[in-house]
Image (cartoon, rainbow, N blue to C red):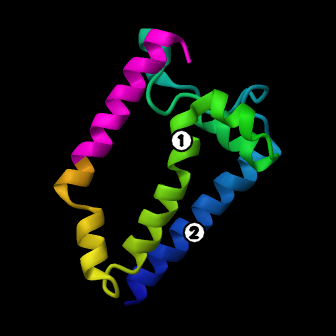
Amino acid sequence: MIKKNLTAVSVIIAVTAVIVLLALFDPMESKWMPRCFFKFATGYDCPGCGSQRAIHALLHGDIGAAIGFNGLLVVSLPLILYLAVVTLGRKRWENLYRRSTSNVVIYATLAIIILWTMVRNMLGI
């Protein structure tokens, strides 16, 4: 029980630290923010390319810019929050957790991510 709570607290602290850093420092201007290795190696955007900039824009209230940087991330944030809550409460909501992490959901998510990657690279978005 203590180990699970320690893990949850550690994750919350890490996520909070990343959010604070992204709020304070603009990834487009910062030299120390990590760059995408996939884009560096291939020249193509990965599904997560633009996520740092999108989160920075969201934290500053610029939804339009955030969508321009990574629209899939912006649209997916409510789902990501939902999955985090369901995962944390998986003992309480076992059926909901099981349905939310079923193979159908996982494969559909993977298909959306692959489709997003292809479309954004073909259309340059």
The amino acid type, in three-letter code, at marker 2 is Ile
Q: Position of residue 56 (x, y in %)?
A: 73, 42
* Marks 1/2: CA–CA distance: 19 Å
Instruction: Find numbered disc 2 in the image and state the secondary structure of the residue it sits on.
Output: helix
Tell me, for residue 12, which label it has, or none.
2
Q: Please, which residue is most extreme toward the left here?
A: 103
Q: Which residue is mark 1?
A: 73
Give the answer, above or below, for where 87 lies relative to 72: below
Residue displayed at 66% across by 62% down: 16
The amino acid type, in three-letter code, at marker 1 is Leu
Looking at the image, do the residues carrying marks 1 and 2 touch, with CB atoms under 8 Å apart? no
Is 21 within the magenta? no
Position of 17 compared to 117: left or right?
A: right
Give the answer, above or below, for where 86 lies relative to 119: below
Mark 1 closeness class: few <14, some 14–19, many ≥20 residues within 10 Å: many
Residue displayed at 52% across by 25% down: 36
* Span highlighted in magenta in the image: 107-125
Q: Position of residue 28 (x, y in %)?
A: 74, 26
Q: Position of residue 113 (x, y in %)?
A: 37, 34
Q: Quadrant of the C terminus?
A: top right
Residue displayed at 37% across by 90% down: 1
Q: Of tags 1 and 2, which is closer to the observer?
A: 1
Position of 95 compared to 4: left or right?
A: left
Position of 109 compared to 34: left or right?
A: left
Give the answer, above or below, for where 21 lies relative to 90: above
Residue 44 visible in the snapshot: no
Mark 2 closeness class: few <14, some 14–19, many ≥20 residues within 10 Å: few
Q: In the rendered image, which quarter is residue 7 located in?
A: bottom left
Residue 45 visible in the snapshot: yes
Q: Main secondary structure of the magenta part?
A: helix
Mark toward the start of the polypeptide (1 vs 2)? 2
